[in-house]
């Protein structure tokens, strides 16, 4: 097995990305209309729609992805980075792909001239396996999230 390579998402990745995306939605017990998935993939490839997508590749196959975006903040004059989606296939978990994907987002946040370098993300409290990694490379905040009913 070769090392994991992180690279930009490409149009030719659609079928493999879609399989990973479906695994991600299944993990979080979510169903989305096909139009949402199609729109997301287009946004991830667009230079102007605000989302970015990276993939983890190993042995010529995609084993994970990360989606992120930059947004204005009321607490800074610079943009903040929100890591919205992160997923690594079950077979590749524990092999470093998740860490490399997060570190690639950190690097993108550091490289963006009008950004603060700050990166944040959310996960469910029961996502214990991922939280083992998150606790090593991030700081658990004190914030509690609320959603509109």
Image (cartoon, rainbow, N blue to C red):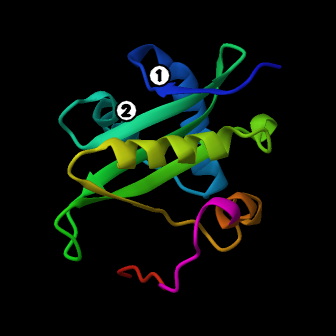
74 relative position to 1: left or right = left
Q: Is residue 142 magenta?
A: yes
| Picture coordinates of residue 22, whole percent (x, y) | 58, 39
Answer whether residue 81 is visible to the viewer in this image.
yes
Between 33 and 90, which is closer to the camera in this rendering? 90
Is residue 54 part of the magenta span, yes or no?
A: no
In x, y percent, where is residue 149? 38, 82
Examine the image and state in which quarter residue 132 appears: bottom right
- The residue shown at (45%, 81%) is 145
Kindly identify which numbered label has been placed on residue 14. Answer: 1
In the rendered view, does 46 fall on the left or right side of 44?
Answer: left
Quadrant that contains the N terminus: top right
Q: Is residue 67 above or below residue 120?
A: above
List x then y, in percent, for residue 148. Answer: 35, 80
- The disc placed on residue 39 is none
Residue at left 59%, top 64%?
Answer: 138
Q: Which secondary structure, mark 2?
A: helix
Q: Which residue is mark 2?
A: 41
Q: Residue at x 21, y 61 (%)?
A: 78
| Mark 1 neighbour density, 10 Å: few (under 14) some (14–19) many (20 or more) | some
Asked if disc 1 and disc 2 are in contact, CB closer than 8 Å, the reply is: yes
Q: Is residue 88 visible?
A: no
Q: Count the numbered circles shown.
A: 2
Residues shaded magenta: 136-143
Q: Main secondary structure of the magenta part?
A: loop
In this view, 5 is above or below 59: below
Q: Is residue 71 above or below residue 34?
A: below
- Which badge, 1 or 2, comes first in the chain's sequence? 1
Secondary structure beneath dot 1 equals: helix
Lateral position of residue 108 relative to residue 23, left or right: left
């Amino acid at each position: 097995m070769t090392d994991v390579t992180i690279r930009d998402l490409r149009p030719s990745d659609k079928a493999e990305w879609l399989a990973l995306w479906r695994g991600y939605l299944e993990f979080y017990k979510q169903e989305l209309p096909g139009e949402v998935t199609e729109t997301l993939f287009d946004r991830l490839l667009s230079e102007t729609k605000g989302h970015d997508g990276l993939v983890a590749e190993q042995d010529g196959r995609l084993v994970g992805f990360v989606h992120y975006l930059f947004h204005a903040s009321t607490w800074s004059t610079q943009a903040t980075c929100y890591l919205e989606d992160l997923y690594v296939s079950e077979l590749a978990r524990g092999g470093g792909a998740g860490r490399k994907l997060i570190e690639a987002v950190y690097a993108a946040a550091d490289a963006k001239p009008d950004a603060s370098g700050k990166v944040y993300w959310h996960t469910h409290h029961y996502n214990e396996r991922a939280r083992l990694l998150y606790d090593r490379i991030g700081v658990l905040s004190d914030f509690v999230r609320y959603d509109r009913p």
